[in-house]
Amino acid sequence: MSAVLALDGVETYYGRIQALRGISLEVGSGEIVALIGGNGAGKTTTLRTISGLVRAASGRVTFAGDDITHTAPDEIVRKGVVQVPEGRHIFPRMTVLENLELGAYARGDQQSVHDDMDDVFSVFPRLAERRAQKGGTLSGGEQQMLAIGRALMARPKVLLLDEPSLGLSPILVETIFSVIVDINKRGVPILLIEQNARKALQVAARGYVIETGTIVKSGAASALLADDDVRKAYLGEE
């Protein structure tokens, strides 16, 4: 399977502090790939490096065969690499509709934008009911739906999800993961960061384990679910 997105030996720093140490990973066409690890392990920094929000000091990030290591963040979005950040970061004073429209800011095909809006509302009927409501008045689960919907409006060719189930009730967690699987079935590869390692590995084809900025394990998601070290460290099993 050809890699749509790949990191090769990426090292990233915050000032003098090294956050990523020779990270190499791939997301293939049609895959969900999980990146799991503890707090401060480097998961979010990996996504921020891919998105161009943090610059890699060395190594390469490639998308569809093109080197995007030093590409501007807005251009990376235009290429089709779209991130849903941890904490949602919707615009609280704007309506649901306005938030979704901002997701398509780089597009000029207005008819297609309207079609995609209808598609987002079909995926998230609750957003359709609240299209005129301010984003800041939505529940946590609804805000997560809005954040994902806004990303879909950019027509992603690969989707980066950072902790999509964080702070949600168990029922909403199931809803969000069902949507993630549905988006992937539509042909969108996904790199998924998730504290709920079990859920992430259950929907992923492959996974990577990151500790202190280093990939320490990788393989089929089913193999990682059965790995004793992973089960003890991330699945809460003895």
Image (tube, helix red, strand yellow):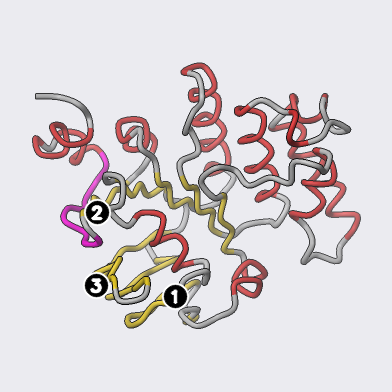
Tell me, yes or no, whether the highlighted magenta stretch contains residue 215.
yes
**Above or below, 36 relative to 79:** above
**Residue 34: x %, y % from top left:** 35, 46
Work out which quarter of the rendered image holds the C terminus and state it: top left
| Real-space CA distance between mark 3 and mark 1, rounded to the nearest whole angstrom | 15 Å
**Residues drawn in magenta:** 213-221
| Real-space CA distance between mark 1 and mark 2, rounded to the nearest whole angstrom | 20 Å
Residue at image mark 1? 62
| Real-space CA distance between mark 3 and mark 2, rounded to the nearest whole angstrom | 11 Å
Of pointers 3 and 2, the one earlier in the residue sequence: 3
**Residue 86: x %, y % from top left:** 51, 46
Residue at image mark 2? 210
Residue projecting furthest to the front: 16
Q: Return the mark for residue 53.
A: none
The kind of secondary structure element at disc 3 is: strand
Q: What residue type is labelled 2?
A: Ile
Rate crowding at label 2 as few (under 14), some (14 to 19) or many (20 or more) other CA atoms within 10 Å.
many
Q: Majority secondary structure of the magenta segment?
A: strand
**Residue 24: x %, y % from top left:** 28, 68
The kind of secondary structure element at disc 1 is: strand
Mark 3 vs 2: CB contact within 8 A: no
Q: Which amino acid does label 1 sit on?
A: Thr
Rate crowding at label 1 as few (under 14), some (14 to 19) or many (20 or more) other CA atoms within 10 Å.
some
**Above or below, 125 relative to 89:** above
| Frontmost residue, 151 versus 20 | 20
Residue at image position (22%, 30%) is 235
Of pointers 1 and 2, the one earlier in the residue sequence: 1
Answer with left or right where residue 151 lies relative to residue 196.
right
Rate crowding at label 3 as few (under 14), some (14 to 19) or many (20 or more) other CA atoms within 10 Å.
some
- Name the mark nearer the viewer: 3 or 1: 3
Q: Which amino acid does label 3 sit on?
A: Gly
Residue at image mark 3? 22
